[in-house]
């Protein structure tokens, strides 16, 4: 709602907590003033419930912490929304404001703010993949509003997303086992919802070397109490990337609908995205017996110009919540996705210290279909002095995929510093009619309860989840079952929070999970079904809320059976990997006009129980001893009101490539710098931004995770302007 006065205009808007946010805008657009939140008691169908009551996940994301870059609350699966400082877990929720202020275009751009996470794939590959606490995390395991199997299987778009929640450590008790059951952590994407104030935002941008970017964000609410909401996000990106030979075309369209009634809340998310990428980067493998060559100029592309990676994804997610009473909420959700991808190219194998490589060209079509569902009950009650906040949930994921490899022509031999140009080749095969090669069912039933005493200063969460996994491998020609693996287990979990005083939280947790090994597509046994294996974590930590600055400390011991590609290119599970680590994180606005987010992660990853004991005690592949991420913003009102300078430093220590610890890559660091200017033109908020990533143009190998070598990202320039109507 706008209020006009002679010199200023005042905008009042409701936040997710029901408070009113007041913004004062000078008539001459000389200054924008953000006033404190006003506590306003309101009632009606359009008003979200207080966070002191039972809260579902439909509606606005919880309010941001000081500085606006990190959420003050995040979602803990069947336990619902919880205050970040009252959780017995290490979790960060990155906001839409941070995404926009950093001009993030991929999920990796957002995750680069988290010191516990590293990418395990090259940039401009059309694929997203991570290492959380040193363990692989695949894009197929990313949740969309708590549902697995809905978002794009390899590269989910960031434009429709309001929050990116990153949980460190296994989230099995909270959300169930994802597609492959990775234990290092969990990423949950929270979709945007219609705002209480109408919004039409148009963004036009440029990305080096010659990419144009256009995005639209439209938000409206309808009805007497704003109970009906519509949010549309669309984006289109096209042009040459900073990497030689590459050209990318990307598009996404996402429609979010919601209804906020007195007791009933509904939401529907429909999405479509498509990516066409020529000369897509791939990971490299390295033969044993020689030092890994230094990283080449990151602009050099060893892939051929006629190689490509094309994909598209269609998805729908439905969710309903009904308040049976003020203290009891019933909910259900369903999601479906259809994903299609074809990759025409190769993973390079470097076979000497000079950087010579072999590139066996393959045509790899990939199709997947997923159905996922969740139902549960969330509530609270008291037993004497003990407050109970409980959750009961059942989940299911039905997933099948088709994946076949067709060799195309002879192997190309070249060099990473001076790649040759090979004659074009043609892809073959009818991809969309392929029968499934793998089918799996993940199902679980869980119950958890948080018991609170002493006004919430002591909170104990206990629970467990029964999980069942069925994986079938199928003949690629006939669809007949060629192998089956059934796994089932009860995975307990517990967490404790003790607050000696109001601002300090001490916590600990124990969790177990099932890990379903993922076989790389390049392995000779790519379609082999492996049974799930048990993993576990013990963690303890502390959190301190200064009001404008949040600090976190975590120490953990995380163990998981590990798998790798052997010398015959066969994937096998052989041994145990134990990662012990310390994490220190910070976020907020400690001084007015100065905002920070980031921290440091120290990891000691070791191999245990290896075959014959030959690698026992060695450092785990792709686990650096130190990871540091620090992003900061500094407002410059004395120079120009609305002007902000930004910067980010990312550092990663050296990593081993092989289990014998004979091949390594050196440590690396990058520097990002930027400027942002926000003002009002003709009564419209306008934002101009310019960012340079990897300012110094450092050439580096980013990771050896999973036994695959991935180059880093070259210097990249991003410029944009956005207008709110």
Image: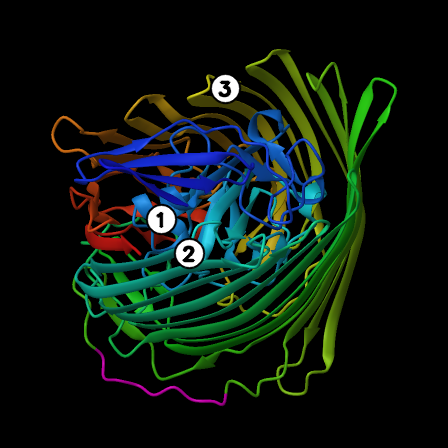
Q: Which mark is residue 545?
A: 3
Left or right for 317, reference 30: right
Quadrant of the rendered structure where residue 661 is?
top left
Q: Residue sitting at 55 percent across and 24 percent down? A: 555
- Counting residues from the start of the chain, the first of labels 2 and 1 encountered is 1
Q: Quadrant of the C terminus?
A: bottom left
The answer to whether the residues at label 2 and label 1 have Cβ atoms under 8 Å apart is: yes
**Pointer 1: what residue?**
109
**Pointer 2: what residue?**
158
Q: Secondary structure at mark 3?
A: strand
Q: Residue sitting at 30 percent across and 60 percent down? A: 202
Q: Residue sitting at 46 percent across and 31 percent down? A: 65
As for residue 57 lying within the magenta part, the answer is: no
Quadrant of the rendered structure where residue 694 is?
top left
**Which residue sits furthest right?**
383
Q: Position of residue 254 (x, y in %)?
A: 47, 66
Q: From which residue to which does the magenta span run?
A: 422-430
Q: Position of residue 290 (x, y in %)?
A: 32, 49
Left or right for 299, reference 493: left
């Amino acid at each position: 709602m706008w209020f006009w006065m002679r010199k200023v205009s005042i905008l009042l808007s409701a936040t997710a907590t029901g408070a009113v946010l007041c913004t004062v805008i000078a008539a001459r657009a000389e200054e924008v003033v953000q006033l404190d939140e006003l506590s306003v008691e309101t009632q009606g169908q359009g008003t979200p419930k207080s966070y002191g009551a039972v809260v579902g996940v439909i509606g606005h994301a919880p309010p941001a912490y000081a500085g606006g870059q990190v959420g003050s609350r995040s979602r803990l699966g069947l336990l619902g929304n919880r205050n970040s400082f009252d959780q017995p877990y290490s979790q960060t929720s990155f906001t839409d404001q941070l995404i926009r202020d950093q001009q993030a275009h991929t999920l990796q751009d957002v995750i680069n703010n988290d010191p516990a996470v590293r990418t395990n794939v090259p940039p401009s590959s059309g694929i997203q993949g991570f290492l959380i606490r040193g363990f692989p995390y695949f894009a197929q395991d990313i949740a969309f509003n708590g549902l697995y199997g809905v978002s794009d299987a390899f590269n989910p778009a960031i434009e429709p997303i309001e929050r990116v929640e990153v949980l460190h450590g296994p989230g099995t008790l909270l959300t169930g086992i994802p597609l492959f059951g990775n234990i290092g952590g969990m990423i949950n994407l929270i979709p945007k919802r219609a705002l209480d104030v109408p919004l039409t935002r148009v963004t036009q941008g440029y990305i080096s070397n010659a990419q144009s970017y256009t995005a639209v964000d439209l938000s409206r609410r309808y009805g007497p109490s704003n109970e009906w909401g519509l949010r549309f996000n669309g984006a289109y990106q096209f042009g040459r990337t900073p990497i030689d030979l590459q050209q990318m075309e990307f598009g996404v369209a996402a429609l979010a609908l919601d209804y906020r009634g007195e007791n009933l809340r509904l939401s529907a998310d429909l999405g479509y995205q498509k990516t066409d990428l020529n000369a897509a980067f791939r990971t490299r493998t390295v033969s044993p017996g020689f030092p890994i060559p230094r990283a080449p100029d990151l602009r050099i592309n060893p892939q051929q110009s006629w190689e490509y990676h094309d994909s598209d994804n269609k998805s729908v997610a439905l969710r309903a919540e009904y308040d049976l009473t003020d203290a009891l909420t019933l909910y259900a959700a369903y999601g479906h996705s259809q994903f299609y991808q074809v990759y025409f190219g190769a993973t390079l194998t470097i076979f000497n210290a000079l950087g010579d490589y072999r590139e066996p060209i393959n045509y790899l079509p990939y199709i997947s279909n997923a159905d996922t569902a969740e139902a549960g009950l969330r509530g609270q009650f008291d037993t004497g002095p003990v407050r109970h906040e409980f959750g009961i949930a059942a989940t299911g994921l039905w997933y099948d995929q088709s994946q076949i490899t067709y060799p195309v022509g002879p192997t190309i031999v070249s060099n990473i510093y001076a790649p040759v140009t090979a004659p074009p080749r043609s892809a073959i095969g009818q991809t969309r009619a392929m029968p499934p090669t793998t089918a799996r069912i993940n199902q679980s039933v869980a119950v958890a309860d948080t018991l609170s005493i002493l006004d919430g200063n002591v909170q104990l969460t206990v629970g467990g989840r029964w999980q069942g996994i069925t994986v079938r491998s199928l003949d690629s020609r006939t669809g007949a079952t060629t192998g089956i693996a059934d796994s089932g287990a009860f995975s307990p979990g517990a967490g404790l929070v003790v607050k000696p005083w109001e601002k300090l939280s001490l916590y600990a947790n124990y969790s177990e999970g099932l890990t379903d090994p993922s076989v790389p597509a390049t392995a000779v046994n790519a379609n082999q079904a492996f049974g799930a294996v048990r993993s576990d974590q013990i963690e303890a930590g502390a959190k301190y809320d200064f009001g404008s600055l949040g600090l976190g400390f975590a120490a953990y011991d995380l163990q998981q059976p590990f798998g790798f590609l052997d010398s015959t290119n066969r994937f096998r599970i052989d041994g145990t990997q134990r990662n012990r680590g310390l994490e220190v994180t910070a976020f907020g606005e400690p001084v007015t006009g100065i905002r920070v987010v980031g921290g440091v992660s120290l990891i000691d990853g070791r191999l245990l129980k290896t075959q014959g004991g030959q690698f026992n005690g060695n450092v785990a592949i792709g686990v650096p001893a130190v990871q540091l991420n620090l992003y900061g913003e500094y407002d410059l009102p004395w120079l120009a009101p609305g002007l902000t300078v930004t910067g980010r430093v990312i550092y990663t220590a050296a990593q081993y490539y092989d289990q014998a610890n004979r091949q390594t890559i050196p440590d690396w660091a990058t520097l990002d710098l930027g400027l942002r200017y926000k003002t009002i033109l003709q009564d419209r908020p306008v934002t101009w931004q310019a960012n340079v990533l990897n300012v110094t143009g450092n050439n580096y190998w980013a990771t050896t995770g999973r036994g695959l070598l991935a180059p880093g990202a070259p210097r990249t320039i991003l410029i944009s302007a956005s207008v709110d109507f």
